Image: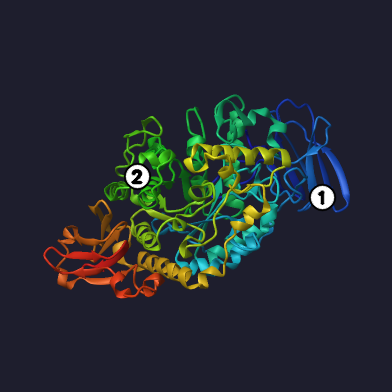
Amino acid sequence: MNPPSGRPRVAGRTWLPTLGAWPDGDGFRFRVWATGHDRIDVLVSDRGRERRVPLPPAGDGTFTAQIDGIGARARYGFCLNGADPRPDPCSRWQPDGVHGLSATVDPNTFPWTDAGWPGVPLDRAVFYELHVGTFTPSGQFNGVMDQLPYLADLGVTVLELMPVADFPGRRNWGYDGVCLFAPARCYGTPDDLRRLVDAAHRHGLAVVLDVVYNHFGPDGAAAFAFSPRYASPTHDSPWGAAVNFDAEGSEHVRAFVRENALHWLHEYHLDGLRFDATHAIVDDGPRHILAEITDDARASLPDRTLLLVAEDDRNLAAIVRPTAEGGWGMDAVWADDFHHHARRLSAGDDDGYFMDFSGDAGDLAETLRRGWFYVGQSSAYRGQPRGTDPAGIGPERMIICLQNHDQVGNRACGERLHHQIDAGVFRALSTLLLCAPETPLLFMGQEWAASTPFLFFTDHNSELGRLVTDGRRREFSRFAAFADERARARIPDPQAASTVEASRLNWAEPRLPDHAAMLAWYRALLGLRRTEPAFRPSARCAVVAADQDTVLMTRTAPTGEAIGLAARLRGHGPIRLDAWATHARPDTWAIAMTSEDQPFAPEASRHESPATWRPTLASTDPPVIQFARPAAIIVRLR
């Protein structure tokens, strides 16, 4: 698809839209791709005046015209072959919902204040994933903005917003988006999202947006009315029609998706994108669509620090290899193996893909050494080899977590990991997460051990909603806990308003003693990660298992400062510290902090002998740490 008037899609730091409706001259230019239609008009209603204007064909499958006298917030729709108006597939705003008319938006009038914003490099990134609709009581962009001081003080550096592309109904996870260019009207206006990003930059926080290019949502996808070629004729996705990246008409669909990515980066000053389930983006063409998007983004914003992240369960090193070497050129990839080992070890999960993970501390240590565990071994769950060797790839390119929206929300009752395991074990696992050389990701509320679940929720029409509810309960029938129909009936209904309300964070909790203590531990760990030379990217890291229940980690700065970390994840007893033997004399080592110190472990203070809960260091030969229970200890190896 060629841009109108010979404009380049990408030219240095300038970028101009080529699809939808955008300011041009004294009005707006409209341009839409459609196949099988002889005539397309645009119906515009602006300041009490309604006009119906033909869009002449441009000869490349698109229809376009510039119309004077139109301002921002005008309502419009495209009429196909004289029919009633339909929303623009590239609409920037759907104030009346995804089935209503579109509205014009002028992004150039927003008063940005972030001209000097340097961005956040990957080696300083600590991601914080949140759902705009459940993060705060208001469920809006402005609510997130109100919590920016808290997030900056916590020590995270990158906000990752779950998808905000508009969806049917009033509530949704975001993965049913159908208006891919329009922020969901229930979260606020396009300028409200801009205000959030601008304010985040003032607080030193980058903002990354989750985008979905593997399927279209099941209700309200206007694109299919304009061309059936948006859908792949040969590929499927688990969630709906797969996007056509390699069949007839795919050049236009690719242009649509590339434009969408650039529109978020340019019109909203976002710092990057997280691409959902890239293993489900099927592209058999000569060059993968995500490699094209990566090159587009970097060419159009050469002076910006971008964070382009893939969610992919295949452990493919090519995702983060340069495009010049045949890779996709992305900055980072979600690496799930750490989560899976940690959950198997601590909570005992063995259904589904957890059957591939031992829950042994040795395998967890191996995962931290490599970034992911599977590098080509056979997967019993998949029945085939999984993974590639990540040798030569920096550990910061692997994003690891203990919770994320999928690993919590795809559980039948939305249980978080800390709901199912002892607080001491959770603190110890959190220590590994935040002290590892990989890039950590937190899921909203994790840092204070939020009591609220995160459930799957939708607001579809009654017929589709019933299918979603029945399908979700049927999906869990293969799990032993839900084999009985009465047990499945207790799974929260995704369509019920109470389901989303139960998922909304309770902001009174961080002030309550047990939650405040967990928050203090997270703040302390993030403070170490931010300030200690041994936790900088140039530091060396060694990870070993002391036994099947304990992981030892050593971080050493180029200048010699070293920190040792021991995380006991099960049981109690002494742990030999042979792995730290090269670091001066044990009698010079000093405990920096333990997860059982009084500010972090309120349950210890309720014990009759609280001091016995704290791990102790003995400078014997060899030195040992004595654990009374699962815990973590951080030691300065002087």
Tell me if residue 69 comes above or below residue 444 in the rendering.
above
Label of residue 166 in the image: none
Residue 212: image x %, image y %? 57, 42
Element at badge 2?
A: loop
Label of residue 372 in the image: 2
Left or right: 187, with 54 as reference point:
left
Q: Separation of disc 2 and disc 1 at Cα?
A: 56 Å
Residue 189 location, quadrant: bottom right
**Residue at horizontal 51 percent and vertical 66 percent from the top:** 151
Residue 500: image x %, image y %? 63, 54
Left or right: 352, with 214 as reference point:
left
Residue 217 in sight from this viewpoint: no
Q: Are marks 2 and 1 in contact (CB under 8 Å)?
A: no
Look at label 1 and name its amino acid.
Gly
Tell me if residue 284 comes above or below residue 327 in the rendering.
above
Question: In this view of the protein, which residue sits in the foreground, 17 or 185?
Answer: 185
**Residue at horizontal 36 percent and vertical 47 percent from the top:** 341
Quadrant for the N terminus in the image: top right
Question: In this view of the protein, which residue sits in the foreground, 582 or 288?
Answer: 582
Residue 199 in sight from this viewpoint: yes
- Dot 2 alpha-carbon crowd within 10 angstroms: few under 14, some 14 to 19, many 20 or more: many
- Dot 1 alpha-carbon crowd within 10 angstroms: few under 14, some 14 to 19, many 20 or more: few
Closer to the camera: disc 2 or disc 1? 2
What is the basis of the colouring in this image? Answer: rainbow
Residue 550 location, quadrant: bottom left
Query: Which residue position holds label 1?
Result: 69
